[in-house]
């Protein structure tokens, strides 16, 4: 083959080779461009989330300060609702039954009058208490995956609760904005819920009733047998740490305190082998202090990873008509000891009165009578339900007619970020004491 022919063939092959290399370079550049743009977008998303979360956290902290500054204004007032359906059975109603109840309430609310005026729902504020430590949110539940709204709710029932707003709210939720952050403040009555500590009572005289009440409550809130058994095992593990008690007496504790002496020799100051002297003193711990200590302790335990609250928070009614009704909504996770008969729903009432018997009949009587007039005290309950006075007498230490334990939930949404804080308090008249805080 001549040299000119070889040269012609080489020239003809080069364009294809160059085209192949060009295509390879274009693919490589496209991949690099896609990778770079993806990383830039991800970084922008992270940066924006940090900005949104900082705004949400700042808004949450500001809202908490506002809530604490107005806490003393909380003055829960029970209302009379003789012509309106009771909130007690919302947790198990089917969508059709629920809709029918809403329609009944819509008619009843138009006809109900108080002192010649339609009932107005007071948006009470919320006070002030001493500093205390926070509790970590161990479970870190992602409620967004459950398709809740911005404030973690599927939509609340319109049936009025014992204070007017939907159960278990003490006041209507307050919503406002701080900059770009949307804030929601809710106050809930914790004495209206089933005290989870009751399931851990170790008193042989009432252990059988406590177990029966716990299972009754769980079954009525829609938990399966497997879920109930799982919760029992979790509570057993907590019981190994500390048992729940209802009866307290003043106790004396021995306390060692270090003794400091003014005159110390150089040798004693330089010596590290000897322990500093101590003084042994005796301290009497009063009953209220013991109760407060137990409440704080179990608030930490019940909100730790020892309890699978995510499973308990799943809606009882699923599908397009699902509502914010779950077993967790009706559980007291703060170490409460008593149930308010004026504000507790049916399944909580039955669990409370199972300690004395006739719980189904007593719960029904309470539900019907409190719609007209709330019970003023324990004696009024015994008088009105005199047929069950013996059963009611056995339940005195489990019930109350005035709620003293509340939680304040602050939820803030900014962009794609959410921040929340839950403050548990006890209120005796104007005296307010914080129990715990959970930051989420």
Image (spheres, helix red, strand yellow):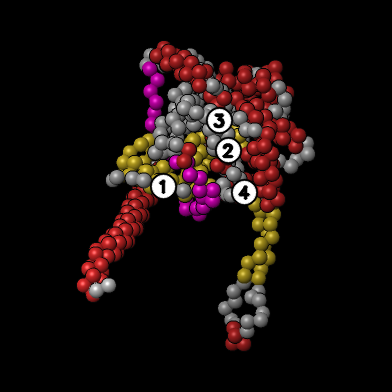
Residue beneath disc 2: 312
Residue placed most toward the observer, 23 or 129: 23
Q: Which element carries disc 1, helix, strand or loop?
A: strand
Reply yes or no: does residue 131 show up in magenta.
Answer: yes
Q: Which element carries disc 4, helix, strand or loop?
A: loop
105 shown above or below 169: above
Q: Residues within 10 Å of mark 1 (few under 14, many from 20)?
A: many
User: Alpha carbon of mark 4 to alpha carbon of mark 3: how far?
Assistant: 22 Å
User: Left or right of 49: which side holds 405?
Assistant: right
- Taking the spot 44% from the left edge, 36% from the top edge, the residue there is 148
Residue beneath disc 3: 316
Residue 254 is situated, as x and y percent measured from the top left of the image, at 69, 60
User: Alpha carbon of mark 2 to alpha carbon of mark 3: how far?
Assistant: 9 Å
Q: Which residues are magenta?
A: 118-144
Q: Which element carries disc 3, helix, strand or loop?
A: loop
User: Alpha carbon of mark 2 to alpha carbon of mark 1: how far?
Assistant: 21 Å
User: Left or right of 340: which side holds 211?
Assistant: right
Residue beneath disc 1: 419
Chain-order first, disc 4 or disc 3: 4
Q: Are marks 2 and 3 in contact (CB under 8 Å)?
A: no
Residue sitting farthest toward the bottom: 267
Residue beneath disc 4: 306
User: Alpha carbon of mark 4 to alpha carbon of mark 2: how far?
Assistant: 13 Å
Q: Mark 2 or mark 1, which is nearer to you?
A: 2
Chain-order first, disc 2 or disc 1: 2
Q: Residues within 10 Å of mark 4 (few under 14, many from 20)?
A: some
- Taking the spot 62% from the left edge, 70% from the top edge, the residue there is 258
Residue 297 is situated, as x and y percent measured from the top left of the image, at 60, 50
């Amino acid at each position: 083959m001549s040299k000119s022919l070889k040269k012609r063939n080489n020239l003809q092959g080069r364009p294809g080779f160059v085209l192949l290399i060009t295509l390879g370079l274009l693919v490589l550049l496209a991949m690099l461009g896609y990778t770079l743009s993806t990383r830039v977008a991800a970084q922008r998303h992270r940066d924006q989330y940090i900005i949104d979360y900082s705004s949400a956290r700042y808004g949450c902290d500001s809202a908490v300060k506002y809530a604490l500054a107005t806490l003393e204004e909380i003055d829960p007032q029970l209302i009379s609702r003789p012509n309106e359906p009771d909130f007690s059975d919302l947790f198990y109603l089917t969508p059709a039954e629920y809709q029918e109840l809403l329609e009944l309430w819509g008619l009843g609310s138009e006809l109900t009058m108080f002192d010649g005026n339609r009932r107005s729902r007071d948006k009470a504020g919320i006070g002030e208490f001493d500093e205390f430590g926070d509790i970590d949110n161990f479970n870190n539940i992602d409620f967004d995956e459950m398709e809740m709204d911005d404030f973690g709710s599927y939509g609340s029932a319109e049936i009025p609760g014992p204070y007017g707003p939907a159960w278990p709210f003490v006041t209507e939720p307050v919503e406002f904005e701080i900059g770009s952050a949307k804030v929601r403040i809710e106050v809930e009555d914790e004495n209206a819920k089933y005290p989870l500590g009751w399931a851990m009572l170790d008193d042989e005289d009432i252990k059988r009733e406590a177990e029966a009440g716990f299972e009754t409550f769980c079954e009525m809130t829609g938990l399966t047998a497997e879920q109930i058994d799982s919760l029992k095992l979790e509570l057993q593990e907590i019981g190994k740490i500390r048992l729940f008690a209802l009866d307290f007496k003043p106790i004396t504790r021995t306390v060692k305190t270090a003794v400091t002496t003014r005159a110390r020799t150089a040798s004693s100051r330089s010596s590290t082998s000897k322990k500093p002297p101590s003084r042994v003193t005796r301290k009497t711990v009063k009953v209220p202090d013991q109760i407060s200590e137990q409440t704080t302790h179990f608030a930490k335990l019940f909100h730790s990873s020892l309890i699978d609250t995510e499973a308990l928070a799943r809606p009882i009614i699923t599908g397009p008509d699902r509502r914010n009704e779950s077993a967790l909504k009706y559980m007291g996770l703060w170490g409460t000891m008593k149930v308010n008969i004026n504000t507790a729903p049916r399944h909580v009432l039955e669990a409370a009165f199972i300690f004395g018997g006739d719980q189904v009949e007593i719960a029904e009587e309470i539900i019907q009578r409190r719609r007209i007039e709330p019970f003023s005290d324990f004696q009024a309950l015994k008088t009105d339900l005199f047929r069950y006075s013996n059963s009611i007498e056995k339940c005195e230490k489990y019930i109350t007619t005035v709620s003293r334990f509340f939680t304040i939930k602050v939820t803030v949404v900014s962009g794609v970020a959410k921040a929340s804080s839950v403050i548990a308090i006890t209120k005796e008249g104007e005296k307010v004491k914080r129990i715990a805080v959970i930051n989420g």
